[in-house]
Image: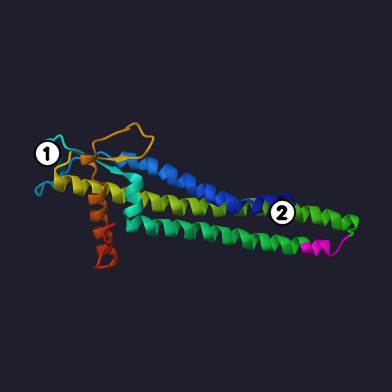
Amino acid sequence: MENNNKLAKLSLAISGVLVIIVIYSFSQISSLNAVSVSNSIDNDTTSAKEVYIEPTGKIGFFNLDSLNSQLDLFKEIEQEMQNSSKDAENKMKKKQAEINVWEQKWSDRAPLMSTEQEQYMKEAQNMQNNAMEFEQNVQMKMQQEQAKLMETYAIRIGNQSKIFAELNGYDAIMAYTFGQSIWYYNPALDVTKDLAKVMNEDYAASTGNVEGNTEK
């Protein structure tokens, strides 16, 4: 049946979706490159007001690919994304097994009488519609889970970049990946290692790993 071929292809589609999500999510990190101006709360009015920070002219860059390879947080996100993909694949395998049982039931009755053929076609149409809807739901759930993970990662990088910049006097911390508009920057401006160290320490503290991450 046509729905069999459709279901059989999902395991390959899952890997493709994972790659697309990662690429798309990484592109969203660029929106977090510039360090936003700090806000302070007026104790009398509890309203936020801008705090002027004298520019230093100091700009830092981090290599996103290198940062990913150094972060324990990214390793956990990768593992959770793989788990999400595996879960989706297992669900589709279970659905395929159900379809196989249904097909075997009708195969054992062959040759079919006219009324049986009508019933077979009716059930086949329902089975196909159900399979398509099931596949869409599985893919949507997986995409939502993985997009949420990458959103969390992007926000974490943005927050830690802001803190790092403020503590070290940077006007901006920018992400760099091969093929972007920035083709070269002075290696002295590369803060990848320092940012990775700060983020690993923060991650270690939040996970109760008091030893933290060893230097890469």
- The structure residue drawn at horizontal position 34% and vertical position 43%, both measured from the top left corner, is 29
Disc 2 is placed on an element classified as: helix
Dividing the picture into quarters, in which one does residue 189 lie?
Answer: top left
Mark 1 or mark 2: whose residue is earlier in sequence: 1
Q: Badge 1, how many Cα within 10 Å: few under 14, some, many 20+?
A: few
Left/right placement of residue 132 relative to residue 188 reads: right
- The structure residue drawn at horizontal position 33% and vertical position 45%, both measured from the top left corner, is 64
Q: As shown in the figure, which amino acid type bears the numbered disc 1?
A: Ile
Confirm whether residue 31 shows in the render. Answer: yes
Q: Which residues are magenta?
A: 104-110
The residue that mark 1 highlights is 53
The residue that mark 2 highlights is 126
Marker count (numbered): 2
- The structure residue drawn at horizontal position 71% and vertical position 53%, both measured from the top left corner, is 126
Mark number for residue 186? none
| Residue 185 x %, y % | 26, 35
Confirm whether residue 47 shows in the render. Answer: no
Left/right placement of residue 177 relative to residue 60 reads: right
Dividing the picture into quarters, in which one does residue 208 lie?
Answer: bottom left
Left/right placement of residue 86 relative to residue 129 reads: left
Position of residue 47 relative to residue 118, above or below, is: above
Left/right placement of residue 199 relative to residue 86 reads: left
| Residue 32 x %, y % | 29, 42
Instruction: Report how far apart the C-alphas of labels 1 and 2 lie in the structure.
Output: 64 Å
| Residue 213 magenta | no
Q: As shown in the figure, which amino acid type bears the numbered disc 2?
A: Asn
